[in-house]
Image (cartoon, grey):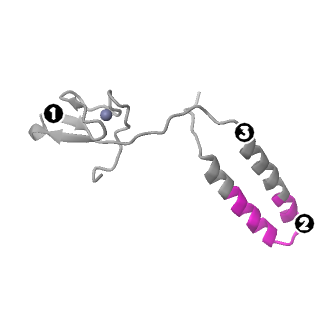
Amino acid sequence: MAEKEYIEREALVDHLENAKEILWHDISLSSIYAAKLVDIFLACVKVFPTADVAPVRHGHWIECNYGLTFECSKCKYPTEYSLTDYCPNCGAKMDGDKNV
Ligand SMILES: [Zn+2]
């Protein structure tokens, strides 16, 4: 099974509203039908149930003790073993901006 992906409802609604606006500016019959279809999509999107997901925290490993140890930029969890893609303590995904 493919990995699940999640989208933000508000961003999708904004995108569909913009698409509908563009379609309404075209006076062809097919554009009017397409705009009405977008209205149906919008109604579906607005009432579709939400998924139970937690926001992803992004962090990075900070080198300490001249590279002998590392710590999580989010929770300061120390490690001296192989660096993992996620912090084993707080769950932060270690792909965050190193300048933050
Ligand atoms: Zn952490």
What amino acid is at disc 2? Answer: Leu
Residue 38 percent across, percent down from the top left: 78, 55
Could you say whether the residue bearing mark 3 is in a helix, strand or loop? loop
- For this rendering, which residue is in front, 78 or 83? 78
Chief secondary structure of the magenta span?
A: helix
Front disc: 3 or 1: 3
Residue 6 percent across, percent down from the top left: 58, 40
- For this rendering, which residue is in front, 2 or 17? 17
Residue 33 percent across, percent down from the top left: 87, 59
Query: What residue appears at the point 35 percent right and 46 percent down from the top-left corner?
Result: 96
- Label 1 neighbourhood size at 10 Å, few (<14), some (14-19), many (20+)? some
Q: Closer to the N terminus: mark 3 or mark 2?
A: 2
Which portion, as a residue range, is magenta? Answer: 15-35
Could you say whether the residue bearing mark 2 is in a helix, strand or loop? helix
* Residue 22 forms part of the magenta stretch: yes
The tally of labels here is 3
The residue that mark 2 highlights is 29
The residue that mark 3 highlights is 48
Q: Closer to the N terminus: mark 3 or mark 1?
A: 3
Residue 58 percent across, percent down from the top left: 38, 42
What amino acid is at disc 3? Answer: Phe
Q: Closer to the N terminus: mark 1 or mark 2?
A: 2
Front disc: 1 or 2: 1
The residue that mark 1 highlights is 69
Q: CA distance from mark 1 to mark 2?
A: 66 Å
Query: What residue appears at the point 32 percent right and 32 percent down from the top-left corner?
Result: 87
